[in-house]
Amino acid sequence: MLALAIRDALLHIKRMRTVMTLVVVALMALLCASLYYAYGIWTTLGAADLPGWMYAAMIGGVLFSLLVGGGLMALVFYSARAGYDDRASHNDNS
């Protein structure tokens, strides 16, 4: 009985590895296609002549977005580990 369960588990893991491999290959193909398209547009239109302050603003916006996203993810993990989500998930219909 145990051998059958182990065999089924190994078969399931093998199938999931195949699926994950296909997903990764598909995502890499999409990434390559999007980079190829972006490169084609970039070279067709030419490089934009932007002043330095615009590049600084763009870099600042990207860094701020990453900081906010990282902070929100940290709050999600903190909330889950501290047990706040457990109290909020109970449905009291009394």
Image: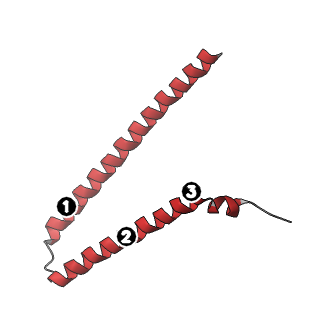
> Where in the figure is residue 65, as x and y percent of width and height?
37, 72
Q: Secondary structure at mark 1?
A: helix
Mark 3 element type:
helix
Q: Position of residue 42 (x, y in %)?
A: 18, 67
Residue at point 51%, 24% (across, down): 10
Name the N-terminal-most of marks 2 and 1: 1
Kind of residue indicated by mark 1: Tyr
The residue indicated by pointer 1 is 39
Q: Secondary structure at mark 2?
A: helix
First in sequence, mark 3 or 2: give its number.
2
List the residue tagged with mark 3: 81
Q: Quadrant of the C terminus?
A: bottom right
First-in-chain label (1 vs 3): 1
With respect to residue 18, does 35 lie above or below? below
79 on left or right of 52: right
Distance in Å between CA atoms under marks 2 and 1: 28 Å
